[in-house]
């Protein structure tokens, strides 16, 4: 009996020790992730997660509005931090607004250029976020070839220094053909967005002989991809088109502008 009790005590002690070790490691991993993630990217992630869950956004929206502009500029000091923050923020506000007021999507021009949200004390439209900040002050209807030279000072401070074509397959504008919404972290961002881009392009690209049929997003922003040759190169980069000697022509499919919210993707 004494032997049995001794073994039981040893077993319970061992199990308790293992449980504490696992719990401790989980806390450390969680803390490490939060520590390594940029503080403002964390806010954008929380905002998008709350939007996804249908939670009240009042507190988070107040946080975004109250961010000191100069601190946001200083803190988002790498390309990946900027892209993660602004893609999350854009997608979060689009989902929030269209769930709250689906009728606003009927006038798309007004929705994108007129809808205003306060970020770092500045009232911004969706066009400000996409074409001004993420696309380095590009003229919206210039197919990506023209830059606005007279951008506002805050836009110059916040904007990305180059154009990364991957953003077009990560931004969700509220339509059925838009890419699904993912919640991006600046830590591991490249791996995350590459997975999203690959999945979207595989779903929207077909090859018939020497003709590629793919998303019109390429056509609308062709300057961001350096023309059709750049589009083919981009598709090859993500393994959607074979890396061979074929000289492909590129055609574009239709875009379904039917309102569609709640299209989320887990990374």
Image: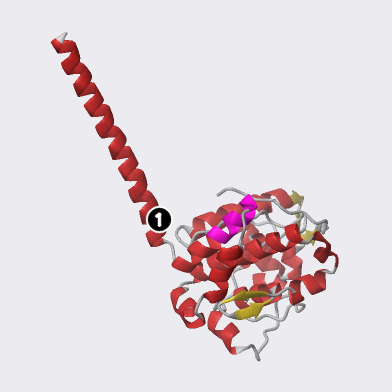
Q: Is residue 184 left or right of residue 2?
A: right
Residues 264 and 22: in front is 22
Whether residue 129 is visible here, answered yes or no, is: yes
User: Disc 1 marks which residue?
Assistant: 33
Q: Is residue 5 above or below residue 241?
A: above
Q: Position of residue 63 (x, y in %)?
A: 53, 69
Residue extending farthest to the top is 1
Q: Is disc 1 surrounded by few (<14), some (14 to 19) or many (20+) residues within 10 Å?
A: few
Q: Position of residue 78 (x, y in %)?
A: 46, 72
- Pinpoint residue 54: horizontal percent, then vertical percent: 65, 52
Task: Decide which of 174, 163 is in the foreground and name it.
Answer: 174
Q: Residue furthest bottom?
A: 150
Residue drawn 58% across the image and 80% down it: 121
Residue ID at (20%, 21%): 9
Residue 50 part of the magenta-drawn span: yes
| Quadrant in the picture for residue 167 | bottom right
Above or below: residue 189 compared with residue 71: above
- Residue at image position (51%, 75%) is 67
Quadrant assignment, res 132: bottom right
Residue in view at x 83 percent, y 62 percent:
103
- Magenta: main secondary structure: helix
Q: Nearer the viewer, residue 151 or 147?
A: 151
Q: Let me know if residue 172 appears in the view.
A: no
Residue 18 at what x, y percent from top left? Answer: 28, 33
Q: Quadrant of the N terminus?
A: top left
- The magenta span reads 46-54
């Amino acid at each position: 009996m004494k032997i049995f009790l001794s073994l039981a005590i040893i077993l319970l002690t061992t199990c308790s020790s293992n449980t504490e070790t696992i719990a401790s490691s989980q806390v450390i991993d969680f803390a490490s992730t939060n520590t390594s993630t940029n503080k403002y990217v964390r806010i954008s992630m929380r905002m998008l997660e709350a939007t996804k869950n249908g939670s009240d956004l009042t507190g988070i929206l107040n946080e975004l509005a109250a961010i000191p502009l100069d601190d946001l500029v200083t803190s988002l000091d790498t390309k990946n931090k900027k892209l993660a923050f602004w893609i999350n923020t854009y997608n979060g506000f689009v989902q929030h607004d269209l769930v709250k007021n689906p009728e606003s999507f009927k006038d798309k021009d007004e929705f994108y250029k007129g809808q205003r949200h306060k970020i770092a004390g500045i009232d911004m439209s969706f066009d400000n976020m996409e074409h001004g900040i993420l696309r380095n002050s590009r003229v919206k209807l210039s197919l990506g070839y023209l830059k606005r030279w007279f951008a506002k000072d805050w836009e110059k401070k916040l904007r990305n220094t180059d154009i990364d074509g991957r953003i077009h397959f990560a931004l969700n504008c509220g339509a059925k053909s838009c890419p699904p919404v993912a919640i991006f972290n600046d830590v591991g961002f490249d791996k995350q967005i590459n997975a999203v881009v690959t999945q979207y392009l595989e779903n929207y690209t077909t090859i018939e002989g020497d003709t590629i049929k793919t998303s019109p997003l390429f056509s609308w922003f062709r300057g961001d991809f350096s023309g059709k040759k750049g589009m083919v190169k981009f598709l090859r980069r993500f393994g959607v088109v074979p890396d061979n000697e074929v000289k492909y022509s590129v055609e574009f499919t239709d875009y379904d502008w039917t309102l569609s919210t709640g299209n989320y993707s887990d990374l």
